[in-house]
Amino acid sequence: MATSIVSKLFRRHVFTQLASLRAGFVFRGKPAAAAGSRSFSSEPPSEKISRYPLPYRKDLPYDIVELMEEVESKGGFLPNVFKVLSHRPAEFRAFFAYYNELMNKETGRLTKADRELIVVTTSAHNQCLYCVVSHSALHRIYSKKPTLSDQVAVNYENAELGPRECAMLDFAMAVCRCDTITEQHFKSLEEVGFDREDAWDIAAIAAFFAMSNRLAHLTDMRPNLEFYNMGRIPRDKSKDKAGGENK
């Protein structure tokens, strides 16, 4: 079950560089006391990633454990957001289900890189270290632009953006700041090719991550070290091919 869920949510090229930050599913499970030998908190972590206790694997529902294992096996590490939010399994499921609806939908005019750029911009405004670092990594992978997310995290108005991206981020920031939304906001989006459904998507992403940012502040969630370098240096495909031939 976890394999089909993860394969649906995340693109293959992303798995080559990261486990993926989030996953979406809505189903119940039983505690996984007898599942495997790995424990997500059986040993003290090398660095503190949350001010709340991390659950032992044996105490987590099986569906959550199964998803964690699949993500880790695909990407090589388990993003800390999975560990931290598993403190409340029911909220974990709801959080990732809505995340999936917003960030992995196939409809509308927003690309995956667009969505990640919205997260980076609004999370920088909200001073959320975890979301800026982790979603900058995703943006680098989706966009193939290794420096743009860094520019946006400092000041999106001074970043190397086109009119379409500027209008998108201006609207996202208006929602993030709780500005009064007027018809002029929609007109500005329409001038660069977005419609009102796209405006809803932009606003929903900004709103969802306003909540996510505050949970990260509450828990003092720390980003995995793997995120910092991810997507900055192009992969050497010749090495990948040679490695495959040697297997």
Image (cartoon, grey):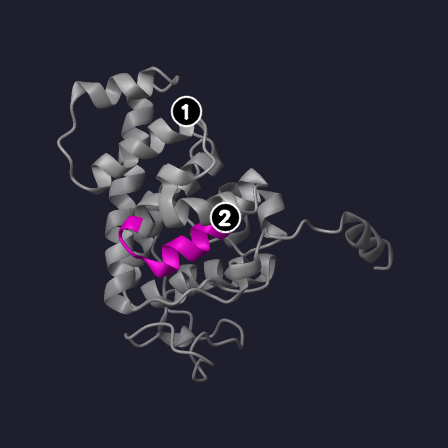
Secondary structure under the numbered disc 2 in the rendered image = helix
Q: Residue furthest front?
A: 158
Q: Position of residue 94 (x, y in %)?
A: 29, 50
Asked if residue 1 shows in the view, the reply is no
Quarter of the picture holding the C terminus: bottom right
Q: Position of residue 74 (x, y in %)?
A: 59, 57
For badge 2, the amino acid type reads: Leu
Residue at 44 percent across and 50 percent down: it is 135
Q: Residues within 10 Å of mark 2 (few under 14, many from 20)?
A: many
Q: Position of residue 196 (x, y in %)?
A: 28, 20
Q: Position of residue 239 (x, y in %)?
A: 80, 54
Residue at 32 percent across and 63 percent down: it is 85
- Alpha-carbon span between mark 1 and mark 2: 22 Å
Residue at 57 percent across and 59 percent down: it is 229
In the rendered structure, find residue 181 and report the number of the disc placed on it. Answer: none
* First to last magenta residue range: 125-138
**From the viewer's perspective, is residue 42 above or below residue 30?**
below
- What residue did someone put label 2 on? 138
Q: Main secondary structure of the magenta part?
A: helix
Residue at 60 percent across and 54 percent down: it is 17
Using the image as rendered, state which of residue 207 and residue 104 is in the foreground.
207
**From the viewer's perspective, is residue 135 above or below residue 68?**
above
Using the image as rendered, state which of residue 165 and residue 70 is in the foreground.
165
Using the image as rendered, state which of residue 106 and residue 134 is in the foreground.
134
Q: Is residue 122 magenta?
A: no
- What residue did someone put label 1 on? 163
Secondary structure under the numbered disc 1 in the rendered image = helix
**From the viewer's perspective, is residue 119 above or below residue 168?**
below
226 lies left or right of 21: right
Using the image as rendered, state which of residue 43 and residue 201 is in the foreground.
201
Of the two numbered discs 1 and 2 on the same chain, state the one appearing first in sequence: 2
For badge 1, the amino acid type reads: Pro
